[in-house]
Image: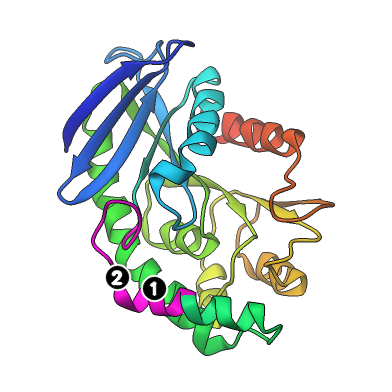
Amino acid sequence: MHFTSEQRLDDGVIEREFSLGEIPGILWTPASASASAPAPLILLGHPPLGLRKMYPRLVARARRSAADGFATATIELPGSGERPRWAAAEQARADLRRALEAGEPVSDEIVDALVLPLVDKVVPEWQAALDALLSLPGICGPVGYSGGVISIGIRLAVVEPRIAAAALFAGSFVPRAMFEEARQVTIPLHVLLQWDDEGNHRQAALDLFDAFGSQEKTLHANMGGHAGVPQFAGDAAARFFARHLS
């Protein structure tokens, strides 16, 4: 891990950009974090739109987490932002847009091509980032995962024992194969569902929640579309992490 920039935000949060090989990322740590008083870590997931485009939302989440005593970090997804183009992913996104614009059902083939290769690529990258982040002074476990493509969160919850709790957003297409993986998830879950999400099949989201194998799982459903998540929904997720990571 190589740090490329550092700045202190106006609330005292330290923001450091880094590279892990070819993978750019950002780490935020609260001013209170130190080697003698390390902060638990939350990994911030996001859709494949690029870190620069997602930055305003990511830094707002990071500031809220820092106020609760948590460090946060995120990485650029494959084929996004400054990373090399990924032709297969671009084709899958184009096929999805074509189906949505035509008012056609999104086929299992499109969903599989869109999501499964991304999960296979990015989960090992998240694990490599986690190795590097937890070696830094001022950062410790337990680790949480928050938001982003829900299938990535599912895979991480299954294969990465350092993830102790996850807050997932049921706002992305889920391949049928991920439902079987969801049954293997056992960590505490906080799942957010926008009831009128125009890009998400509500019943599929409910079926996925039912499939999770966790003994502690909570579904927070709010009225409104994909971008209409209310502020209090974020507050509930913050309380969830405070319970499980503090």
Asked whether residue 218 is drawn in magenta, I would say no
Residue 160: quarter of image: bottom left
Q: Is residue 175 visible?
A: no
Q: Is residue 167 visible?
A: yes
- Amino acid carrying label 1: it is Glu
Quadrant that contains the N terminus: top left
Magenta residues, as a range?
77-93
Q: Residues within 10 Å of mark 2 (few under 14, many from 20)?
A: few
- Residue denoted by label 2: 86
Q: Is residue 58 left or right of residue 210?
A: left
Residue contact at pointers 1 and 2, CB within 8 angstroms: yes
Q: How is the image coloured?
A: rainbow
- Residue denoted by label 1: 90
Query: Which residue is drawn at the image coordinates 15% and 49% (left, top)?
Result: 21
Q: Position of residue 34 (x, y in %)?
A: 31, 13
Query: Which residue is drawn at the image coordinates 50% and 89% (left, top)?
Result: 109
